[in-house]
Image (cartoon, coloured by chain):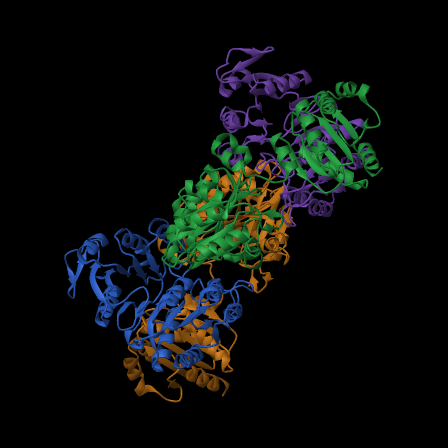
Chain colours: A orange, B green, C blue, D purple
Amino acid sequence: MDLFEYQGKQYFSRFGIAVSPGDIADTVEEAVAVAERVGYPVVVKAQVKVGGRGKAGGVKLANDVDEVRRHAGDILGLDIKGHVVRRLWIERSSDIAKEYYASFTLDRPHKSHLGMLSAQGGVEIEVVAEENPEAIAFLSIDPVHGLDLATARRWVHEAELDEVAREQAAELLVKLYDCYTTGDCDLAEINPLILTPEGQVHALDAKVTLDENASFRHPEWEEFRATETDDPREKMAKEKGLNYIGLDGSIGIIANGAGLAMSTLDVVNQVGGSAANFLDIGGGANADVMAAALEVINSDPKVTAIFVNIFGGITRVDEVAKGVLEALSRVSIAAPIVLRLDGTNAVEGRAILAPHLNDRLITEPTMLDAARRAVSLANA
Amino acid sequence: MDLFEYQGKQYFSRFGIAVSPGDIADTVEEAVAVAERVGYPVVVKAQVKVGGRGKAGGVKLANDVDEVRRHAGDILGLDIKGHVVRRLWIERSSDIAKEYYASFTLDRPHKSHLGMLSAQGGVEIEVVAEENPEAIAFLSIDPVHGLDLATARRWVHEAELDEVAREQAAELLVKLYDCYTTGDCDLAEINPLILTPEGQVHALDAKVTLDENASFRHPEWEEFRATETDDPREKMAKEKGLNYIGLDGSIGIIANGAGLAMSTLDVVNQVGGSAANFLDIGGGANADVMAAALEVINSDPKVTAIFVNIFGGITRVDEVAKGVLEALSRVSIAAPIVLRLDGTNAVEGRAILAPHLNDRLITEPTMLDAARRAVSLANA
Amino acid sequence: MSIFVDENTKVIVQGLTGGQGRFHGLRNRDYGTKIVGGVTPGKGGTDVEGIPVFNSVKEAVAATGATASFVVVPPKFASAAILEAAEGGITFIVCITEGIPAHDEAVTYNRLVEDYPDVRLLGPNCPGIISPGKCNIGITSGDIALAGGPVGIVSRSGTLTYQALHELSQQGIGQTTCVGIGGDPVPGTNFIDCLAAFEADPETKAVMMIGEIGGSEEERAAEWIKLNMTKPVVSYIAGVTAPPGRKMGHAGAIISGSKGTAQAKMDALAAAGVHVCVNPTEAGQKMVEIVRAL
Amino acid sequence: MSIFVDENTKVIVQGLTGGQGRFHGLRNRDYGTKIVGGVTPGKGGTDVEGIPVFNSVKEAVAATGATASFVVVPPKFASAAILEAAEGGITFIVCITEGIPAHDEAVTYNRLVEDYPDVRLLGPNCPGIISPGKCNIGITSGDIALAGGPVGIVSRSGTLTYQALHELSQQGIGQTTCVGIGGDPVPGTNFIDCLAAFEADPETKAVMMIGEIGGSEEERAAEWIKLNMTKPVVSYIAGVTAPPGRKMGHAGAIISGSKGTAQAKMDALAAAGVHVCVNPTEAGQKMVEIVRAL
């Protein structure tokens, strides 16, 4: 789950990481109120989960109440790469002496944590990594042992942060690592991490991705959930616990397991079709889940055929069959459904469906056959 | 100080690192005796401090006494890239299932130790690093904390060493690190580190460079010193505590400090000359050292002019002047000497030399002037 | 022969008294797996259809001589269960649990490597392992596997593992062992571990490898195959048509920029001499050809 | 102004009672440096020409208020002396000792960074630091330096440091501070530290940087200059004619393959806008031009 900048900053604050004083505003008047409270000059920042908002006019400096009013008015409702700005973050403007970069993420090939620190912040780290990799000090951290202050001190030295910033930065990095681990982040990134002319180090931006698997120990994440994705289909799917990604094609896909779902996309593509979505009903899905999946697909007007590809393992095919029938009894499914059913309890599942098969509810013996049938139906 | 393979292996043994059973031999008969003792087949290996001995015919397998005799005879006296083979290492041949690479060295930019481990050994690591850098698992080690077994275990995993080799390799790496640090190595490298078909891990080669600065705590290094460099000028210089490197030009160079000596080479080169050597008399050199330096230079028949470039700091110029006079009184210096003297006690030094100046003992006020003069004398 | 597990492997089930643990544990026993005990703290002394339940792994190991454990517990307890298994003397742990926090996986993996280097963890979030006719630990339907070899299967995807078994069994091609390594951020066992084991297993004559987009494990495996593998390998990589930058189900299946694309993986594998196929059916057919030509 | 040390810096000499310590310590005092004490274990209570000697740094700091220490002890005692200085409250340590084992340097450096992050170590194996007319800690002849600025000098080579001072002083160009960082494997202070300090010092108007072959510190400095330095920099890199693969005097001066060559360093510096000169005299002349044009 990606957080908005303001949420990331609030999350950082819980771990003692210094950020600029500020608050959120959903209207021009709220923006003015926050600005008056934190003191001028302020920065008015669009809250969108997409990069490049600065270039798109989503970040403005305001020196007085009139400027706040004007900028807040301009930015609220602005469309930044398809993301409409509905909320602002207003914070006290910081004088910047230097901009650094700091982040933690999982280094999958090395099965350890990877810290990245650079004295060249404020620009895209991918660009720095490409053009001048030596400007990034990489730190591999054993998850068992974590990051201590001594190592952080070596690290800020190696990264050649300005001397006046080093001790504060080292302490901040230890806190950021704590936020990353105790806070169950997939990514905790500060870009830029700034040094002010007064010699203070703090986070001027916050990019945080939370690991949904850790929600069980973070009841406080509930507040972040309210502001999640705008896409109504994805929202609906999420509410029902489905793993759904909207795509542009015409064939609705339902499969159990991410691999099989991806493979289904591939096969549909290979026989000349294109998928309307990726939808993994997960392991152990029951009739309810299957019915919900069909409803989500049904809400997509692009879909002209549905391909249900199930290989039962922990998921039982008889449950899937029941779910299909339940969905058909609950709502009117617009597109024809092609099913391919194999694996655990496949015989039972096929038997449940048998009496209901017709030219809009079809089974096929193999994945390829089913894909071909779905494509021909979609194009009919 | 670079060690021969056999010395490296002996050094490894002290730290508990497994090597093949073997011994040195300086004659064919000694080679036979060692082979009979360790058991056939054996490998007969030229002991030279240069790479590529295998391709040069300096490493041969011998299955019986006749082959040992033949190979030992062939290899002793062989010239490998200018290094004449005077000693052999005879060891029991090992069956090889896999070849790995392992080394420790100082990572100067990061001010930490750098471990390199690869499942692709037996080839030049530079080639692997160039062509397939992901095949090397790099490990940065904090010198304060060192390498523990837990970290070594993570490392052998990451390097994808064969599973049967991992635990032994991890233990060996901890010992190799101990050898590297406690043993004061600049480099401790094993290439190849092998896994035998029986599942044993041991060092099949040894490349060790010792840090001369640590000699004071390693009286046992004395034995390695006996076998050092062949170049008689370098040997003579070393005995006198001078830092000497033979080059191909005609101007003998003496300077105090490595930087000034290098700079002297550069300036001589810029004014059209070429240096016969690099010679740094070090800091705080006295008259004896200066006299010794002149004698070393004088032993080089290529030298047709000598350039003494001194900027006194810890080295006192009056001492340098005394050394020059002492050398002149002791031996007949073949080439004319041009001196440039500045810094600590330069006035006193120049005064000491003044009565002795002539067309073969000349002072010049600047480095450039002195270089030009030396070059014109050399070419005269 | 088979890899990692065989007909003599004694298995305990951590979480046997739970719904899933009971279902799969009994199913594995029905398949012929030597399920010798269960572990549920506080339920020691009871039994599940004749399988004795112990309070701790240590007790279970002492009483049964088990060397393998099947961990079927909720995500919040999975890390502790895995470490308890290692500490209790188990050397092969299969964890099917889905939804374990990435940080828990990272700590658990490294703690195993550091403190219990002889322990192998398979998973988490994997379908488990089946050596057909001998041992089945996990959630794979035993009836889709065929005993007798000669193919080894290793797969990063759960359902595609079944698909691969199915494609081969339907053509009468048996499997020595089928290992589902799972697609989680920090899998305990990876492609190379399995490829090396198959290479060393005399009864395995060819290997099918099912990968997917994201990460670089398939590329690393390709490098290993190039240098070490003498047996033919057939591969299929799922996700050719996946859009970049979106997580496809599990954390592994995400493309960042040009890295981790199916095409990059297929190219690396092809360069290593692997038979690269574009869907599971084609991969199955290719393997049939190879096995028939052996 | 000057960097790191000035007329108020109080200095103790660790090893004052030794031959070198006495010679250079007294010479530094004669120059006007506030040498307020010496440290030699077991000789506390004595004095060297009026400079009180203490048994430990801690005592010396308590008694004198010193913030800097000049370490002049044999290689085998140097690391312990440096760490004692840091622990005793010294924040600026100059160590001229040559021949310290590389592993001692590596441990000492990292221990300082980890446990005493506010302490700066200059050296080891360096000529020291001189802020002309104010403070001279080390072995540089005070008479070759000229007070009044506006040039800052930083040099990796000992004697070339003197050469650089000489070239400027002879032309009547003064120096704010001249820092010899030394060429050992693990120097406590590097080019960037000094460049940053000179950039921040209002009286320094231009910087002369003397590098040499080997390592990549000059390249790193070039990158830093490109991004941060507003003042003109003149550089000279020794070792253009050095043969690859041979150690030129100290461990730093070695060319490995194509890395660390003088040409690579000169190219990097030129690309960063530095005035790159091919010998010390030319560098001096270039600096004279720059200063006269200020």
**Quadrant of the drawing holding the N terminus of chain D:** top right
Q: D215 and A198: which one is in front? A: D215
Quadrant of residue C32 within the rendered picture = bottom left
Q: A322 and D11: which one is in front? A: D11
Q: C193 and A338: which one is in front? A: C193
Q: Residue at x 72, y 26 (%)?
A: B331
Q: Is residue A59 left or right of residue C271?
A: right
Residue A361: give x, y in percent of width and height: 38, 85
Q: Is residue D279 left or right of residue C14?
A: right
Q: Can you see residue A302? A: no
When the figure is inspected, residue D221 is found, relative to residue B333, above or below; the finding is: below
Residue B211: give x, y in percent of width and height: 54, 37
Q: Is residue D260 left or right of residue C68?
A: right
Residue B161: give x, y in percent of width and height: 43, 56
When the figure is inspected, residue C136 is found, relative to residue B261, above or below; the finding is: below
Residue C274: give x, y in percent of width and height: 48, 72
The number of discs equals 0
Q: Can you see residue D87? A: yes
Q: Residue at x 56, y 13 (%)?
A: D52
Q: D2 and B126: which one is in front? A: B126
Quadrant of residue C280 within the rendered picture = bottom left
**Quadrant of the drawing holding the C terminus of chain D:** top right
Quadrant of residue D159 within the rendered picture = top right
